[in-house]
Amino acid sequence: MPHKIFRNIERPDRDVVETLGRQGVATVHEAQGRTGLMKPHMRPIYPAARIAGTAVTVSSQPGDNLMIHAAIEVCQPGDILVVTTTSESTDGMFGELLGVSCQAHGIHGLFIDAGVRDTAELTEMGFPVWAKAISAQGTVKNTAGSVNVPVVCAGAMVHPGDVVIGDADGVVVVPRANAATVAKAAEIRLAKEERTRARLRNGELGLDFYGLRTKLKELGVEYE
């Protein structure tokens, strides 16, 4: 199969992307039927990291960051690099210098199912990264891969132009075609949660307003 770099992709409406980012990973994941979540080994390099943007996907060989360099050229401001490798890797494929290059091109952040290095410097720069591992293991720039092709990153399917959201709860992917619908569903969910929050503050029990006493009875749970 030939390796390709696709320069042009369709991107969702910017306002929808920003709305999904404000709603957060947990809410968006629930609003789209508990789908699209990357595996929990994808962790931010600093706790306050929070981003949302359009996926520019990268398929790389393990231990080789050539295609990350190639991907930066085709990014637009507001994009996020989503990088996976053809086999498992924890090598430090992204560091400070690539972060500087990304920031210069308006790239919002990185999700990489491999290793990252220079985390102190990236944190000081305010460049958000979610990665599988932190490793000083260096990489090469020798092997072809592809940019803006469908990839599986940390167990989640990602197509170029999908919305990708990251915060302290993890990373979730929203298909581009569904982004506006999911954002609306998430708004409804947030409003419902606020009503529930008010009831809990007033001392009501979830057992009562969720109807869970009936569930306990059905399950044969007895009070003594």
Image (cartoon, grey):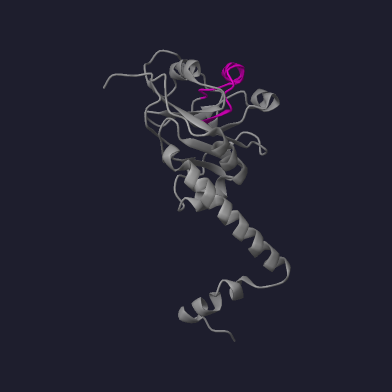
Q: Is residue 27 visible?
A: yes
For image coordinates 51% across by 79% down, the residue present is: 214
Q: Quadrant of residue 145?
A: top left
Where residue 52 sits: x, y (%)?
Answer: 57, 35
Residue 47 in the magenta stretch? The answer is: no
Q: Is residue 140 above or below residue 10?
A: above
Apparent side of residue 1 relative to residue 21 in the rendered image (left or right): left
Query: In this orientation, which residue lies closer to the viewer: 86 or 179?
Result: 179
For image coordinates 28% across by 19% down, the residue present is: 2
Q: Is residue 69 above or below residue 35?
A: above
- Please, which residue is most extreme toward the bottom here? 224
- Please, which residue is most extreme toward the left here? 1
- Please, which residue is most extreme toward the right here? 202
Q: Quadrant of residue 148?
A: top left
- Please, which residue is most extreme toward the top here? 142
Residue range in magenta is 92-111
Apparent side of residue 216 relative to residue 103 in the rendered image (left or right): left
Q: Exactly how many numbered labels are in the figure?
A: 0
Q: Is residue 220 visible?
A: no
Q: Quadrant of the N terminus?
A: top left
Apparent side of residue 122 relative to residue 69 in the rendered image (left or right): right
For image coordinates 55% across by 33% down, the residue present is: 14
Where residue 35 sits: x, y (%)?
Answer: 44, 48
Where residue 29 sits: x, y (%)?
Answer: 51, 49
Q: Is residue 23 above or below residue 102?
A: below
Where residue 175 sits: x, y (%)?
Answer: 43, 40
Q: Is residue 158 above or below residue 200?
A: above
Q: Quadrant of the C terminus?
A: bottom right
